[in-house]
Amino acid sequence: MSARTAQGVSTRAVVVGALLVSLLLAGVVSFYAASTPDGLTKVSQEQGFAETETEHGAAEGPFAGYDAGFLDGDRLSGGVAGIAGVLVVLVLGTALAYGVRRHSDASNDAGTDAGAPRDQTQV
Amino acid sequence: MHVPDGFFDAPTSIATGVVAVAAIGVSLRGARRELDDRTAPMAGLVAAFVFAAQMLNFPVGAGTSGHLMGGAVAAVLVGPWTAVLATSVVFVVQTLMFADGGITAMGTNITVMGVTTVAVGYGVFRLLQALLPKRVALVPVLAGIGAFVSVPVASLLFVALYAVGGAAPVPLDTLTTAMVGVHSLIGVGEGLITFLAVAGIIAVRPDLVRGARPVLVARTLEIRTETAGASA
């Protein structure tokens, strides 16, 4: 993971850098996002089927509508909601990826206790 | 394009739910081939980036906006199977934590905005990659084109689903025109963001961009051919 390549930028540096960009986008830049209805919402209004929308089951959640409603101020509540979302998605996505990844050389020495299916190519 | 609760009848919502679960199941197997100790950190990161970018609605004409769907950029960065998993994580979190996209529409949103943009975006990307010169510099451009195409196609799938199980009767021709029209514009934004994100990673670590691997391999083979002569 910390291996450096010919390009000189470690995987960790790329991950940290891109994560910082994501946090900045969700936590700060999102405040300046357009607030007009998105394409589907607009079309549903124009075509007359917007009113079939029903109440969302999670509408009362603490982060509903990308708004940390327990905090004062649009900028703060939106930014905190965005950062919380990035971190939750990061943790879940990373856990999922590590859960399904194939193990590199180390797993061959340690045996396949994780139940990784072995190739039938051992002759 | 997050579909709320109530737009589709129960059979359609259940059917897209089954499609989404099946796609995730197949992707869990496929992602084993894409993810190893080196690339696994990228998967969570890509999901986090797609989530962040989806918060950035950009204007696409009078009174309308759109945002990244993210299937194409995820597929080019980490591979299509992992991309289905990453975008699904995004939509599940958006639905349950942020009330964005209906709970009964979760399968619809995963299928339309995730699976479809992955399949179309990555399919167009790989097709162009096969037809065009093998250059690393082209990877972000082709990713952007794939992303651009994926959005109106996803909107077409929405129309098709609506024709089958929409809650209200709507003339399909005007619905098609409206959906594809506005989502072609949103697709331009999808293409630009995808281009920038892929170009950004390519600039520092092209080997971390899964969609660049065939090109990097080709480049390596080229060098070997020059030094060692023709090889079968």
Image (tube, rainbow, N blue to C red):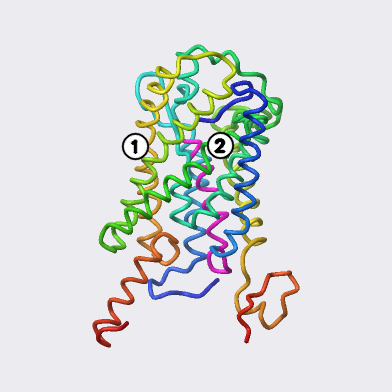
Q: Nearer the viewer, mark 2 or mark 1?
A: 1
Badge 1 element: helix
Q: Are marks 2 and 1 in contact (CB under 8 Å)?
A: no
Q: Nearer the viewer, residue B16 or B178?
A: B16
Is residue A17 or residue B112 the one in the foreground? B112
The image quadrant that residue A53 belongs to is top right
Seen in the image, is B56 located left or right of residue B188? Answer: right
How far apart marks 2 and 1 lie (CA) works out to 26 Å
Tell me the amino acid under the disc marked 1. Val
Which residue is denoted by mark 1 in the rendering? Answer: B188
Q: Is residue A11 magenta?
A: no
Q: Residue furthest right?
A: A113
**Quadrant the C terminus of chain B occupies:** bottom left
Label annotation for residue A18: none
Above or below: residue B113 compared with residue B224: above
What is the number of callouts on the image? 2
Residue extent of the magenta highlight: B35-56
Residue identified by numbered label 2: A79
